[in-house]
Image: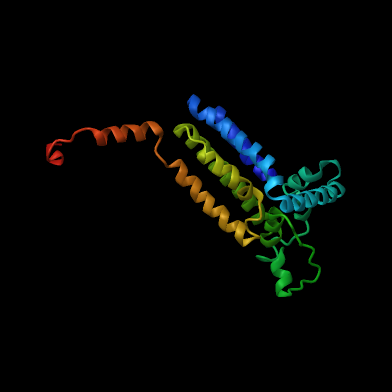
Amino acid sequence: MVHSALVLIAALACAVLARGRGVSARAVIWPTVIAVAAIALYPILFPDAFQAFVFRWEHATASESQAFAEWGILGRALYAFVDFFSLMGNTPLAGYGLGLAGNARLMLGIEIPGFTGWAETDWARQIVDLGPVVGLVFILYRIAFTGWLGLRCLGGARRMSDPLPLLLFAFVGIDLLYGLMTGHGTVNGYVWLFIGFCLAAVQAPSAELSSARAGEMLMPQPRFANLMR
């Protein structure tokens, strides 16, 4: 739900960032209409799924409130940014090895004397797997990569007056930054797939350039145009 809210916020932000009144109006109207329609129709069309969602949400809120006090579900989201600090001083310089911080170690039955490196968040797994030095470098790389991709998508959205690059980034940015990209195969696959979508979206020609090219195609061309250049 929080991830969906981020995508909605990005859509509304396009109303300010995109050029042209028509694009700005659509960036406000359509996300609002879709969100309101989804909230209104979801309990009616899918009552069983809605009840299951409410049940899980209430129990998750109660659990998160116990673990993160008044921060609740927001505390769990922010916890992934600081969890790795507690492992920096307890991990060998070269780390324990790839995959040993997550489910792979349990599935393979690997036992390491004195191992205390179980990690649920991805940044913490980088520290356990790679060590405090290389792991921290990899975390900084993820931060830099996310910032670079965000700037590319922001520039593309403004240049083309199209919210698509920013919407794609709003979906993939959180997983690229600190999601379970290295600990979950499906997440890893979707992250790189949508990074490709983002880069393809920002390479699309602007609306003005597309109109100019269409005008050139409609203009009558002289015979043997290549020979006359």
User: Residue sitting at 48 percent across and 26 percent down?
Assistant: 20
Along the line of sight, which residue is nearer the eye, 12 or 82?
12
What quarter of the picture does the C terminus occupy? Answer: top left
User: How many discs mark residues in the rendered view?
Assistant: 0
- In this view, 6 is above or below 134: above
Q: Is residue 201 left or right of residue 35?
A: left
Q: Position of residue 184 (x, y in %)?
A: 64, 60
User: Residue sitting at 51 percent across and 40 percent down?
Assistant: 164
What quarter of the picture does the N terminus occupy? Answer: top right
- In this view, 62 is above or below 18: below
Q: Position of residue 32 (x, y in %)?
A: 62, 34
The color scheme shown is rainbow
Q: Is residue 17 left or right of residue 81?
A: left
User: Residue sitting at 57 percent across and 53 percent down?
Assistant: 191
* Residue 195 visible in the shown view: yes
User: Residue sitting at 80 percent across and 63 percent down?
Assistant: 116
* Residue 85 visible in the shown view: no
Along the line of sight, which residue is nearer the eye, 24 or 43?
43
Q: Furthest-top residue in view? A: 21
Along the line of sight, which residue is nearer the eye, 50 or 81?
50
Q: Quadrant of residue 109?
A: bottom right
Q: Position of residue 183 (x, y in %)?
A: 66, 60
Q: Furthest-front residue in view? A: 44
Along the line of sight, which residue is nearer the eye, 147 or 191?
191
- In this view, 108 is above or below 168: below
